[in-house]
Amino acid sequence: MLFTDRADAGRRLAVRLEHLRDDDVVVLGLPRGGVPVAAEVAAALDAPLDVILVRKLGLPFRSELAMGAVGEGDVLVLDEDLVRRAHVGDRELAEIERRAREEIERRAESFRRGRTRTPVTGRTAVLVDDGIATGATAVAACRVARAQGAAHVVLAAPVCAPDVASWLAEEVDELVCLEAPEHFRAVGQAYADFHQVPDDVVVDLVSRRVP
């Protein structure tokens, strides 16, 4: 067991991110589990905290395979080559995107309670999750942050599957991962306490560091 809980992991991750203290940083937690980790990082860097909301766009016949992602601010990141090879039509793609955006809007209201999204344009966006298994959601979030105007994108997690680390490093300006266990099976194996994070905890943590 590597970490006591998400707060412990966040404090230890913050030490590795201390060099960013003098940058214009926005810390973005991936809901839900990434937010308690991100909250510790934001506190240590004296930076604002927000969630980054993304939804992967799965292929119609293989929903687990992402052909792109959507994010707030009308951001659309699309693997056009995959869409073409999978013969996904414009109408079908539009419907998948519509459902994804509806879910993002629902989650934005749930987590922010009417507050506007913290802008990242021209800033250092530090994206934090409690762990990275396949890397698909993390990559989507990084691409969305970049599309939203972030000047520098940092992806940080306490634990990461070793076989995805090199792929992730190509997507970001900086990758910070404390542990990459050789026999990685799941993110939860790195924590003594890995209970589910309720929505109200996410809301409370983010509201404490509203800029």
Image (cartoon, rainbow, N blue to C red):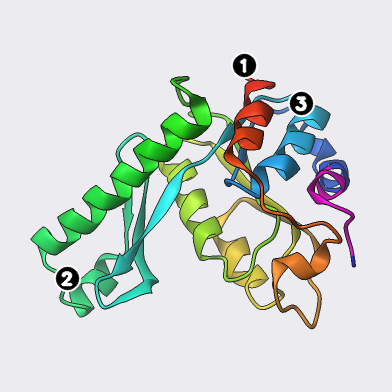
The kind of secondary structure element at disc 3 is loop
Q: Position of residue 3 (x, y in %)?
A: 88, 57
Nearer to us in this view, 94 or 24? 94
Can residue 119 be seen in the rendering of this structure? Answer: no
Q: Position of residue 85 (x, y in %)?
A: 21, 79
Q: Are marks 3 and 1 in contact (CB under 8 Å)?
A: no
Residue kind at label 1, given as amino acid type? Pro
Report which residue position mark 1 lands on.
211
The label shown at residue 201 is: none
Nearer to us in this view, 125 or 198? 198
Say whether disc 3 or disc 1 marks the residue closer to the N-terminus.
Answer: 3
At label 2, counting other C-alpha atoms closer than 10 Å, the crowd grade (few under 14, some 14-19, many 20 or more) is: some
Report which residue position mark 2 lands on.
88
The kind of secondary structure element at disc 2 is loop
Calculate the distance from the C-alpha at mark 3 to the C-alpha at mark 2. Answer: 45 Å
Report which residue position mark 3 lands on.
22
Residue at image point 71% right, 66% down: 187
Q: Nearer the viewer, mark 3 or mark 2?
A: 2
Q: Quadrant of residue 132?
A: bottom right
Residue kind at label 3, given as amino acid type? Asp
Residue kind at label 2, given as amino acid type? Val
> Is 8 inside the magenta-drawn segment?
yes
Calculate the distance from the C-alpha at mark 3 to the C-alpha at mark 1. Answer: 16 Å
At label 1, counting other C-alpha atoms closer than 10 Å, the crowd grade (few under 14, some 14-19, many 20 or more) is: few
Start-end of magenta stretch = 2-10
Quadrant containing the C terminus is top right
Q: Are marks 3 and 2 in contact (CB under 8 Å)?
A: no
Nearer to us in this view, 117 or 125? 117
Calculate the distance from the C-alpha at mark 2 to the C-alpha at mark 1. Answer: 41 Å
- Left or right: residue 139 compared with residue 24: left
At label 3, counting other C-alpha atoms closer than 10 Å, the crowd grade (few under 14, some 14-19, many 20 or more) is: few
